[in-house]
Amino acid sequence: MVDLRVQIGGGLELKNPVTTASGTFGFGQEFTDFIDLDELGGIFVKGLTLKLRQGNDYPRMAETASGMLNAVGLQNKGIDYFIETTYPDIKKYKTEIFPNINGSVVEDYIAVAEKVNEIEGINALELNISCPNVKEGGMAFGVSCPSAIAVTEAVRKAYDGVIIVKLSPNVTDITEIAKGVEGAGADAVSLVNTFLGMAIDYKTRKPVLSTITGGLSGPAIKPIALRMVWQVYNAVKIPVVGMGGIMNAEDAIEFMLAGSSAIQIGTANFIDPQISIKILKGIEDYCKDNNVSAVRDLIGALEV
Amino acid sequence: MKKVQDFKVLEYSWLNDENYILKLIADDEIPEIKPGNFAEIKVPDSADIFLRRPISVLDVNYEKKTISFYIKAIGKGTRKLGQLNIGQTVNIVYPLGNQFVVQDEKKVLIVGGGSGIAPFVLLGRELQSKDVDVTFLMGGRTKNDIFLTDEFSKYGKVEVTTEDGSRGEKGMVTHHSLFKSEFDFDKVYTCGPDPMMKAVAKIAESKGILCEASLENMMACGIGACLCCVTPTHDGNKVVCTEGPVFNTKELAW
Ligand SMILES: Cc1cc2nc3c(=O)[nH]c(=O)nc-3n(C[C@H](O)[C@H](O)[C@H](O)COP(=O)(O)OP(=O)(O)OC[C@H]3O[C@@H](n4cnc5c(N)ncnc54)[C@H](O)[C@@H]3O)c2cc1C
Ligand SMILES: Cc1cc2nc3c(=O)[nH]c(=O)nc-3n(C[C@H](O)[C@H](O)[C@H](O)COP(=O)(O)O)c2cc1C
Ligand code: FES
């Protein structure tokens, strides 16, 4: 038996390191025909804001070489709807549910965090300061050190549970931001969010996305994401939750070796709605085959 | 219940050089499929085709465990799906989306164009089983764009319009004479190019009858997880792959 438990900061333990990434897994309910959600280490639900958001205009996606661009723009029904309607339905699952919180101004983040603080059964939130698809706020917080620190400090005061700050890769030095939010009270960091990208239809000479630019995800970003996880792992003491183009167990293991305490599966859920569980089984098999008795022994075990 | 399932290519029927029917066969049971449902098909052996492709279910045979799709080759994925080997494995996620509503209609009109005709075989069969009087109206640029009329004629009358007049009446579907004579349909179903569906919806509205349209949209997941496939409605953005693809056109803000 492989011990699959991992610690992801603030004393929070997951039963295994496999979780699903915000915005790629809905609220979990979309996947119940395909997998048993109870088997997952955790679910990072779709980004939540204080008020309902319609998101961006269509078209919101473009397929790219080994990946996709999205410009969803945080469409969601608002934190109150989540608390009153969605969470009561999904709290029965024996997996850690992580709200992913967003705002255009610091006050919004605080208001959402205060509401999350009141939800019984929620132990942690993911503070998203890296959404590239909203006009105001979002990624703007995550690309400058002072604003990343300010929003993390503010949410730290408003929220008693575990805070995982989700970092943007669209920065010059991601380790500076990671260290900044660590100092501001983050219990863990998750990375990466999508890379700012763009698609053009040469026939019509028009941008493909309604927002012109959007966020790139999928295997196309994996080597850069892996590099950033490795750099951040070496720069901070808090746990790192890694993601970016993980398509199979091999990718997931590489992210753990680079320093991820847990991993998130994003775009791969669109290609195979059962992939998260397959990856979990794959990690377990790898441990068995290589005499790794506890999966946590893989974290940062890169031999350099 | 939605399912991820492996099928094998059983046979192709080519309607012309860019339109074909792909028939697949499975080992396992096929879940119940409703008129309007679609599948997300993984294009095999294509590293450059990352996402699945949404395609309506054309027909299904539960005993023989076969399912078929009518596909128009318009890009790399739909072309590749026409070039598989017999026996090759194809993975699909299905059945997805909502369905055309069949209540207590007596006489209905089904207007289709392009690859939008696919869902109307299952719909025609369901309507026939409920003794509904069905008229199919199929439109295209030329006679080479009109397909499956033999199949549709099993379930009702078939009318055709072509822009060049090479088959049926000349003009667009909305110019067909049935809109000019006594119009006693109590519902219109439509699927095809957006401008066609909009024009059809407008006529239905002017006649004061219900119109359901099945929308085509760019999709990533097909199961409501990514929110990429929205369409604006009078009640905000709706998710086409789960709240649609079939919508009452009165809801749509298109
Ligand atoms: C619910 C639903 C049911 C469908 N049913 C059928 C069907 O029964 N038969 C059939 O032939 N097609 C159907 N389609 C359309 C089909 O999904 C697209 O033609 C297909 O995804 C194109 O893939 P491709 O790789 O060939 O094209 P690509 O190479 O990806 O693109 C070629 C061109 O087509 C455009 N395009 C791609 N996908 C779509 C789309 N979904 N809608 C509009 N434009 C698009 C692209 O922008 C590009 O300009 C359906 C779509 C939906 C959403
Ligand atoms: C369609 C889509 C929607 C997303 N929405 C969110 C979101 O609401 N909040 C968030 O923090 N990240 C969001 N992301 C980013 C993912 O959580 C993840 O960071 C990114 O996709 C990289 O991982 P991947 O390559 O495995 O997909 C979204 C990604 C996609 C593709
Ligand atoms: S395609 Fe993902 S929500 Fe519809």
Image (tube, coloured by chain):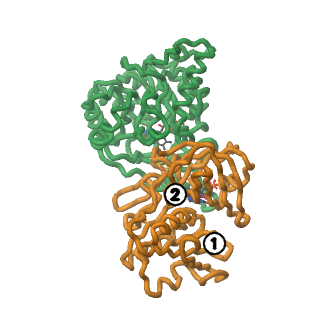
x, y (%) of residue A72? 45, 48
Mark 1 sits on what residue?
Answer: B150
- The disc at residue A254 is none
Q: Which label's residue is closer to the chain start, 1 or 2?
A: 1
Q: Which chain is orange?
A: B
Q: Are marks 1 and 2 in contact (CB under 8 Å)?
A: no
Same subunit under labels 1 and 2?
yes
Instruction: Report the residue at 58% width, 71% height from top.
Output: B154
**A16 displayed left or right of A65:** left
CB at disc 2 and ligand 1 closer than 8 Å? yes
**A250 displayed left or right of B129:** right
Q: Quadrant of the C terminus of chain A?
A: top right
**Splitting the image into 4 quarters, where does residue A79 fall?**
top left
Mark 2, residues whose alpha carbon is within 10 Å: few (<14), some, or many (≥20)?
some
If the picture is divided into quarters, which one holds ligand 1?
bottom right
x, y (%) of residue A195? 53, 39
- Residue B7: in sight, yes or no? yes
- Between residue B14 and residue B218, name the one nearer to us: B14
**Splitting the image into 4 quarters, where does residue B17 fall?**
bottom right
**Subunit bearing disc 2:** B
Helix, strand or loop at label 2? It is loop
- The disc at residue B217 is 2
Helix, strand or loop at label 1? It is helix
x, y (%) of residue A149? 37, 28
Label total for image = 2
x, y (%) of residue B186? 40, 75
**B80 displayed left or right of A133:** right
Q: CA distance from mark 1 to mark 2?
A: 28 Å
Q: Which chain is green?
A: A
Mark 1, residues whose alpha carbon is within 10 Å: few (<14), some, or many (≥20)?
few
Amino acid, disc 1:
Asp
Amino acid, disc 2:
Asn
